[in-house]
Amino acid sequence: MIDLDRLIAEANELAPLPASTVRLAGLVANPDCHLDDVAELIAFDQALTVKLLRAANSAASASAAPVGTAKEAVFRLGAAQVLALTVACGARPFLQSRVAAYGLDEGALWRHSVAAAVAAETAPNFCEVEAPPETFTAALLHDVGKLVMGRFLSPEILGFIQRAQEVDHLGQLEAESLLLNVHHGELGGLVAQHWQLPPRIVKGIIYHHTPELALDVICDFTCLANQVAKRIEAGLDGRRFELAVEPGVMERLGLTQSKLDNLCPIAASRYVQVSRRYNAV
Amino acid sequence: MNTADFDYIRHYVREQAAIVLEPGKEYLVESRMQTLVRKENIASIEELVSKLRSDPKSGLHRKVVDAMTTNETSFFRDIHPFEALKKQIVPDLMARRAKDRQLTVWCGASSTGQEPYTVLMVLAEHFPELLKWDFKFIATDLCTDVLVRAKAGRFSQLEINRGLPATLLVKYFTRQGAEWEFREDLRRRVTFQELNLVKAWPVLPPLDIVFLRNVLIYFDMETKKAILGKIRRLLRPGGCLLLGGAETTFNVDDAYERVACDKTTCYRVKQP
């Protein structure tokens, strides 16, 4: 079976995010964050500036006049979006990988991550509570733990997980916890800590399947974003997917069933548009 | 794994720890035994069972039981019992015990220590004067390996991430390499000892607060009755038992009464 220490070590051995991304994450997590400070930090990183400009001028913003400076890009996108795009830029090489153990072909995890980020960006318009600025990034990275877990899930272990699901009617997360003493959300949290991302992003990732344990709105939004992302992907593939958002999440976010029904198609159409922005970084 | 080996292990675990493993749980036994055989450098589960059969007194038996014990735990697990402790249970008991200034807490399945240390943090945060009383804290578990870990009070980042607020991490833990160590002065307040709930118990003092959460679910009705009966005889008047969210004394031992405490339920022995 899996040696937990090896799993933890693996999570801590992923290549670090660029220093500017870590600094930006710290800045955006600060409630007193000012867009001028964000723009200044971005401007120091030429490669990142180019990518952000590309993202800011992508199809999602095509109707607006093109932007030419880091400051304009930051003011157009907002600090939260800039952070998500910057983290996406650093994490994309990882998230593009194939994760066979979870049935994810090359690029599938990235697409799901972007769909979740877009869903997180769209969802607050339908909710009664405000999303913290770290939400898009938490949604983008919510499944990053699968990258680590996936490397250790041998066919034998996958067989045990499947049996646990069949015999004891456990979900994927519960089966992982029972058999491996850790689940992919927790491993994702370790990766985010290793990447020195702010605690709230870490929390959003750890509890994206179990937000009732954290009682932090970022976990509710991340949980919702994951579900909506699955619905978006199913829609694009012509599959049916029954949304299963916990009543507690809906209640805490002030999201009614009719609002949720409206959110999904809007998030899906935004995904087609906004995903180009993420794919531009 | 073959049926005979599965039956041998499940019967042994049932006999030693009253853990019920119905047919269908082969996947769980096999996955846990795979870990054990690798650790012990044994070629296969078949060989492990063969060793167990040939030497009934080998230390391996103990390791099999330990491997099959679920040690799921976290800081502030389910949160509400700790809120109840802070808002209702401890203030009430401190008022009742103000004369003799004696209070004893027992965590009956303390695993790697997260639950007893959570209780201690709640007490140190909100009732520091209680720690100056004749205050005893006993934490027990069936598994000796986890007791050693609990006593050391060292936790990985993964364990810390499970429920511990950052403010308490800073206040009560110090970083030791990749791990976090619980404050020594508080750690020393806990007496960790081995106790198998389904065998004869060592002598325990009269108890005021008992945490026995998410343990009874693994036992059959007779075992639950026996354990609840023993606790009942140890609880002082007004003493309080806290069970897991899916557990109850109702229809198991009706000498207890349910008491609503904040957003959780605790159990007290009915007074005549």
Image (spheres, grey):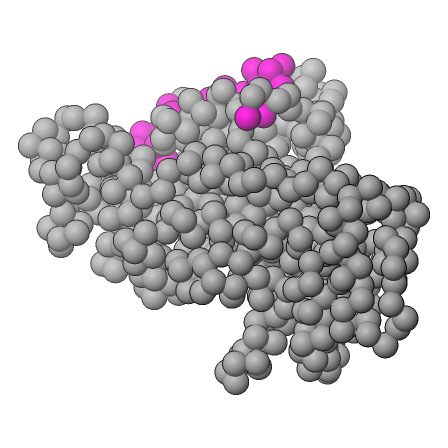
Residue B123 visible to the viewer: no
- Please give the name of the residue rendered at 41% of the width and 49% of the height, measured from the top-left corner: A151
> In the rendered image, is residue B68 in sight?
yes
Q: Residue at x 19, y 44 (%)?
A: B9
In the image, what residue occupies the spot 68% across and 73% down?
Answer: A271
Compared with B116, A113 (above or below) is below
Find residue B190 and report its image quarter: top right
Q: Nearer the viewer, residue A198 or B2?
A: A198
Magenta residue check for B198: yes
**Image vertical order of residue A256 relative to residue A224, above or below:** below
> Which quarter of the image is occupied by the C terminus of chain B?
top right
Residue A181 point in image, percent of width and height: 43, 44
**Residue A248 in picture, x, y percent from top left:** 67, 65
Q: Which residues are magenta?
A: B178-202
Residue B127 in percent (x, y) is at: 73, 27
User: On the picture, is B63 further left or further right than B184?
Assistant: left
The answer to which image quadrant residue B52 occupies is: top left
| Residue A107 as seen in the image, left or right of residue B13 | right
Q: In the rendering, at what x and y percent does residue A159 appear? A: 30, 58
> As rendered, which of B141 and A275 lies closer to the eye?
A275
**Position above or below: B42 against B193:** below
